[in-house]
Amino acid sequence: MTGKRNTGATGRKVQADRFVEATPAPLTLSEIQDRLQRAILNGDDAVLDNILDNSRTTRQTLFGVYRNAYVGRLVDILQSDYQLTCDYCGADYFREQARAYVGAHPSHTQNARWYGVRFPEFLKASDGHAAHPELAEIALIEKTVADAFDAPDAPVLGFEGLAGYAPEQWGQLCFAPHPSVTRLDLATNAFALWKALKDDDETLPEVSKLDVPEHIVIWRHDTAPMVRVMGAEETMMWTEACRGVRFDGLCEMVATFDDPDTAAVRAAGYLQGWLTSHMLTTVTLAGSSKKKRAAKDVERKAPSHGRKKTVPQSGIA
């Protein structure tokens, strides 16, 4: 009969099936990995639905091992990259700051070498910076030494690279810095502290804030990072040279610092030091696109990329 109600057992089962939730599809490997990553990096506990308690403890405790191990590994990386900074402030305080850095800066790189590049900035912005401004600067020196070690390879300009220019052309020469060179302006005696830490001195200098910033330059000579102080006059000349000012213009600027009669000699002395130290990569004649490079490119054994396995040994020039 049309429209007859189905009152049998089969009909009742069909009705009941409408209220049974469908079994969710199992997660793919990619989805599980995504949950694990979000749980570790962002504290998202959704992954706990895919973990079982065991007979001894809860899933929260079990997964906490992974969370703590991840943070601990990043702290270890920072401590390795900033060993002298850690020696200066003590392991307990350093690891406290490192854990705060991990919380504020989740890792977004697959190469651990670059994870801590913002750590000096973090220390400078921390609550303890006002009382200990030298700490961030010591860390900055360490970072810059490591950056010099890992800087890209480039030709090194030597005296032979200038041989093709006539004396009357020297005033038109423009120089380009090697990519490993960085100049820092320090507000404390952090360089003296860093050097004492590096040399493993038993007594460190007293911390002092400087009335005038101390300029230091860090670069790579062959495969070794080098560090030295730059005087005010040389710092000015280096800064302007990096901006592409011609050599005759540099001499004129040097003349404003001291005896103008010896300005050219002083400028030539600074240039000689840069060439000897491998701090320049090219020379260009102003108004010409032609560049002179060193006669022979310097082959470097140090890797330009990738995490270093040992702390680079830097020298004091």
Image (spheres, rainbow, N blue to C red):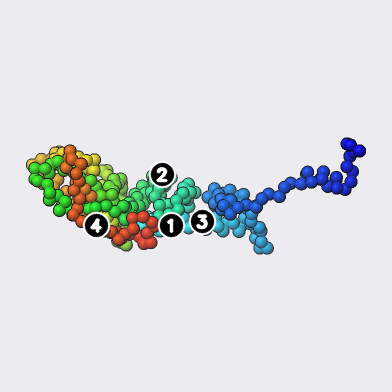
Can residue 132 be seen in the rendering of this structure?
no
Q: Is mark 4 on a helix, strand or loop?
A: loop
First along the sequence among labels 1 and 2: 1
Q: What element carries label 2?
A: helix
Can residue 160 be seen in the rendering of this structure?
yes
First along the sequence among labels 2 and 4: 2
- The residue that label 1 is drawn on is 77
Above/below status of 23 relative to 261: below
Q: x, y percentage for residue 170?
A: 12, 44
First along the sequence among labels 4 and 1: 1
Pointers 2 and 4 in contact (CB under 8 A)?
no
Pointers 1 and 2 in contact (CB under 8 A)?
no
- The residue that label 3 is drawn on is 70
Residue beneath the point at 29% across and 45% down: 185
Indicate which label's residue lies in the foreground, 1 or 2: 1
First along the sequence among labels 1 and 3: 3
Q: Distance between the residues labelled 4 and 3?
A: 40 Å
Q: x, y percentage for residue 279?
A: 23, 51
Q: x, y percentage for residue 194?
A: 31, 55
First along the sequence among labels 4 and 3: 3
- Callout 3 amino acid: Tyr
- Callout 4 amino acid: Val
Q: Distance between the residues labelled 2 and 3?
A: 24 Å
**Mark 1 Cα shell of 10 Å, populated few (<14), some (14-19), many (≥20):** some
Residue beneath the point at 43% across and 55% down: 112
Question: Is residue 313 found left or right of 128 in the rendered image?
Answer: left
179 or 88: nearer the viewer: 179
Residue 125 numbered tag = 2
Residue beneath the point at 54% across and 48% down: 42
- Residue lying furthest right in this view? 1
Indicate which label's residue lies in the foreground, 4 or 3: 4
- Callout 2 amino acid: Ala
